[in-house]
Every structure is written in structure tokens, then in C-alpha cells.
Amino acid sequence: MNKPLISVENVTKTFKRQRRKEGFLGAVHALFSRQYETITAVDDVSFEIGRGEVLGYIGPNGAGKSTTIKMLVGILVPNSGHIQVGGLVPHEDRIENAARMGVVFGQRTQLWWDIPVSESFSLMRHMYKIPPERFRENLELFSEILGLEEFINTPVRQLSLGQRMRSDICAALLHDPAIVYLDEPTIGLDVVVKENIRDFIKEINLKRDTTVILTTHDMSDIEKLCTRVMVIDSGSIMYDGNLQQLKERFGMDETLDVETEAPVADPDDLYQLGVSEFQQEGSKLSIKYNKATVNSTAVIGWVMERRRVRDFVVRETEIDEVIRRMYLARSN
């Protein structure tokens, strides 16, 4: 078995936070007698990530995602446990670790605000000591895929959000990093730009075997990019595994949307098939069932026996609903 690129063993990270009482008297009291409470952001977490994986690291706000990523890049030091990234301990080898990774934050930019995008890229070539020929090859490839030509000579402050995000992703990959950390890379973008960025990430992963760790609240990013997901909540890993297996465990419902030439009457025998929900609005039907117990062919056949079908589509449970059900199952 190949050695993992990232290894996290029994890592815990805590923070001390001052406990304050409300009101003016509470503020005065805090000046003379400070009390602290310990907050556990990451609690005894262990996992491994192999080279070339595209991992979706997801969870609600405050779950511990950002703290984990900050320890992987070397910004934070764990209280206990051990982290290795490409054979390095991130907080001990920060400079070398930084040279091997790329980072994209949806709300921040690593580009220089008042100079053209092309000049930011040139500065990065010198910072990362990228060989000139390799720099040209990467810039040509990334420009072609991301469509940078139209604005590469424009100052960063004049770019739209979509243009800036494409530029930031290019900048993060110019030096051929082994790992790329993407934090909300498609936030606020229109559908077309989102698809361009997703296609680019998939292509770079395929061609360069780049490991991608993606944190996002956009479940479409997870579904279209990741085969493996890790769900964290309250500092602990709730799930770590195949995306399809997660959907099979918490998302076995399917919905059949059908348009018929005329309304359908008397759906009582449809419920006998095991259908859980039937809705009708004119000639449009919506039928929900659990595909583990109900054969979709039988449901479609039931409709076709009664009315001529104009169109139909089968919809699986969306990934955000799968995650919601996971949290509900845990709380119960």
C-alpha cells in the first residue's frame, strides 16, 4: 500500500476563551478577575489522504473544518496528536510545506490589488522559483482552460468576482503544488463560471495527480468533484468514506416527476406498491419512494397503464438533504 500524502493521528486542538458576564458590571468584573473556558475545536481526529484524491471536507459553521485546514498548512499547532503532510510536520517546516501547496479562499485573494493579473503571476514565478519554461507551459494551459486571456492584463481591482476566482485558482497552481486547499472556490459565482472552475479542477487532478481538499457549503461542488467525503461536527469526524455509500445510507429516496396528457385518479393502489408520497398538480405528478424497497419500473408502469406519458424524470435525493438526514440521525 502506498504511503498516504497526508496523515493525521489523534489530533486535538483547543482554545481558551475568556468568559464574560453580561452588562456593565460584568465588563468591570472582567477587568479584575478573568475567567476562561476551554473550547475544543478538533477532538481526537484521525484520517489519511492519498495522493491524487479529491476530498470534500464538510460540516456546519464552527464544526472544526477551518481549524483542521489551518493545522495542515502549518498556521496552527495541535495540542496533541501528530500531523504529517508529504513527510513534513507542517508547523515545524512551514516554508517548505507552503512551497508544496496551493490555497484558494473564496473571500480573499492572493493577487496584488493594483497591478495587472499577469504581473501578479510574474511575481509568483520569482517567489516560488518556477523555471521559466515550466511557468510558460502552465500559464498557457491554465489560460486556455480558464479563459484568462480576456482580462490577464487588467488590474485585479477591476475584475469581476468570477474573473478574480479564476485568476486565484491559476495562481495557486502555477508552481505545481502537490496539494491544493480550496475554501468555497465557487461562492457567489454564476452557473457558467462554476462549471468552468469545476472542469478545471477535475482536469488538473486527472492530468497532474494533484490532491484536492475542498471545503464548501455548495453541495453541487461536492457532488461533481468528490468521490470521498469527510463530515465533521463539533470537532469529531461523523463520516469518512465514499460519497455514493453515504447517499445509499441516507438518501435512498427517489422522486419520479411525470407529465401526462390528463390527470390521474385514484392513486390508492400506488401506495400499495410502497410509494411514500403522491402529489398532483393538473397533469403533472410527483411520486416519491424508497428505491431500496420499491422498483421504479413498477411506478413508471403504474402511470403508463393509466395515462399517456409526455415526459418523465427520476431525481435522486440531493446531497444537502443527505447531510441533513445524517445530522438528524445523530441528534436522535
Image (cartoon, rainbow, N blue to C red):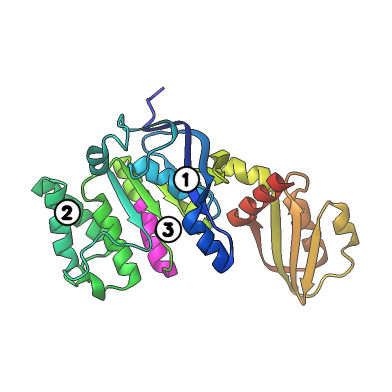
- Tell me which label, 2 or 1, sits earlier in the chain: 1
Q: In which quarter of the image is the N terminus?
A: top left
- Tell me which label, 3 or 1, sits earlier in the chain: 1
Please name the residue that numbered disc 1 is placed on: 15
Q: Where is residue 156 in the image (x, y as percent from the top left)?
A: 23, 70
Label 3, label 1: how far apart the Cα atoms are: 25 Å
Label 2, label 1: how far apart the Cα atoms are: 34 Å
Asked whether the viewer can see residue 220, the reply is no
The amino acid at mark 3 is Glu
Asked whether the viewer can see residue 101, the reply is yes
Q: Nearer the viewer, mark 3 or mark 1?
A: 1
Q: Position of residue 31 (x, y in %)?
A: 47, 58
**Element at badge 1?**
strand
Return the mark for residue 184. Answer: 3
- Tell me which label, 2 or 3, sits earlier in the chain: 2
Q: Residues within 10 Å of mark 3 (few under 14, many from 20)?
A: some
Q: Is residue 100 magenta?
A: no
Return the mark for residue 124. Answer: 2
Give the main secondary structure of the magenta stretch: helix
What residue do we see at 38% from left, 52% from top?
182
Check the image and report above or below for 320 versus 153: above
What residue do we see at 36% from left, 48% from top?
181
Q: Where is residue 134 in the image (x, y as percent from the top left)?
A: 14, 47
**In the image: residue 65, left or right of residue 130:** right
State the residue in front, 127 or 318. 127
**Element at badge 3?**
loop
Q: Residue furthest front?
A: 32
